Amino acid sequence: MAENTHLQELESLRDAAIQELESIPDESGLEAWRVEYLGRSGKLTQVLRGVSTLPADARPVIGAAGNKVKVALEGRLGERQAAIVNARLDSLADDAIDISLPGRSLAVGRLHPSTIILREITEIFRGMGFQVVEGPEVELDRYNFEALNIPKDHPARDMFDTFWIDANKDAEGRFTTLLRTHTSPMQARIMEAHEPPIRVVVPGKVYRYEATDATHESQFYQVEGLAVDKGITFANLKHTLHEFARRMFGSERKMRFRCDYFPFVEPGVDVSIDCFNCDGTDSSCRICRGAGWLEIMGAGMVHPNVLRNVGYDPEVYSGFAFGMGPERIAMLKYGIEDVRLFYGNDMRFLRQF
């Protein structure tokens, strides 16, 4: 009698479990069902553990029947899991990718126009034998001004609207650390660390404490150039910059050198090229405004005081230096009228390059 009762109990448990299993819609429900019936404390497990309390002659029969139920439930669980997975895949079929269609292009990143023009400038000078080096953006007053023939209280300091950093002060209470206002400090650093001959260009970001408008920004890029050796003359400077202008703006470009003042060169000049848009014949030209010339950089022969400050003998060595704004070069080359576009993150502008 006890044997029949246990067999009926196993059959009822099996039928109830299978009926419940068929109504489960997802995998989390399947796991809950498995724990309820087949887990360590599950209903079937409890029945099987009770076999040891049965009479000796009933134990083999009930034990075998219980194991059959367990195998049957595990098999139905596997079938239900497969059915749920297949149903989910079928539901995705409507949105499946048709591999016969052309692929969808991924968005590809682009170089920033400042990066493009910086690379173009530095590659031109690499081709003329210059090395490319970089320097710190947080600079010392000594290199940013004093080593470049701009001592304390020199009027030329008014040319540079400076961001001072209050980390260090000298004995007189003046700040000695700043965000570099130009890349020219690398002239002194390079000459201090190396003996001539030197031929380098220095690209990098600089900072000026000034209001922004269509032609001014508080942060922008510069490219500094320096060549020092025995016997370097102004003719070497003119040839180098003329070759740069030809490679950057076209082989037919003409150049103009006019006297200008920079405290770390003597003589100093501003360098212009003839307008490649109108050749100076159109008074309404949007690039040269009818002037016929476009200023592209400042340059000059390295001042003897700068050479002395780094331990060079100006009677033995001479050199030239130049500095340009890559954004200005890009503005001239591509007809961009507002420097703020370079830093505005306007994708309509950036996608053009």
Image (cartoon, rainbow, N blue to C red):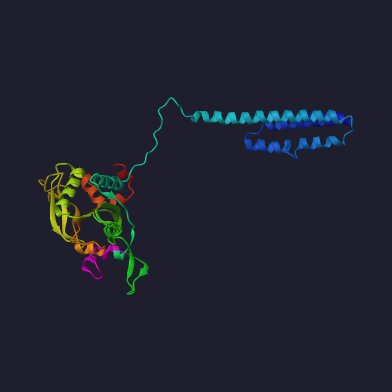
Who is closer to the viewer here, 202 or 7? Answer: 202
- Report the residue at 88% width, 31% height from top: 2
**Residue 99 painted magenta:** no
Q: Position of residue 210 (x, y in %)?
A: 27, 61
Who is closer to the viewer here, 209 or 188? Answer: 188
Q: Is residue 86 above or below residue 149?
A: above
Marks counted in the figure total 0
**Residue 161 painted magenta:** yes
The answer to whether one can see residue 151 in this image is yes
Q: Residue furthest bottom?
A: 172
Q: Position of residue 304 (x, y in %)?
A: 19, 62
Quadrant that contains the C terminus: top left
Q: Position of residue 220 (x, y in %)?
A: 29, 54
Quadrant that contains the N terminus: top right
Q: Position of residue 81 (x, y in %)?
A: 64, 31
Q: Residue furthest top?
A: 100
The answer to whether one can see residue 294 in this image is no
Who is closer to the viewer here, 301 or 297? Answer: 301
- Report the residue at 66% width, 37% height from top: 31
Q: Residue furthest left?
A: 281
Q: Is residue 264 above or below residue 9?
A: below
Q: Is residue 327 left or right of residue 239?
A: right
Who is closer to the viewer here, 217 or 171? Answer: 171
For the record, the magenta segment spans 143-163
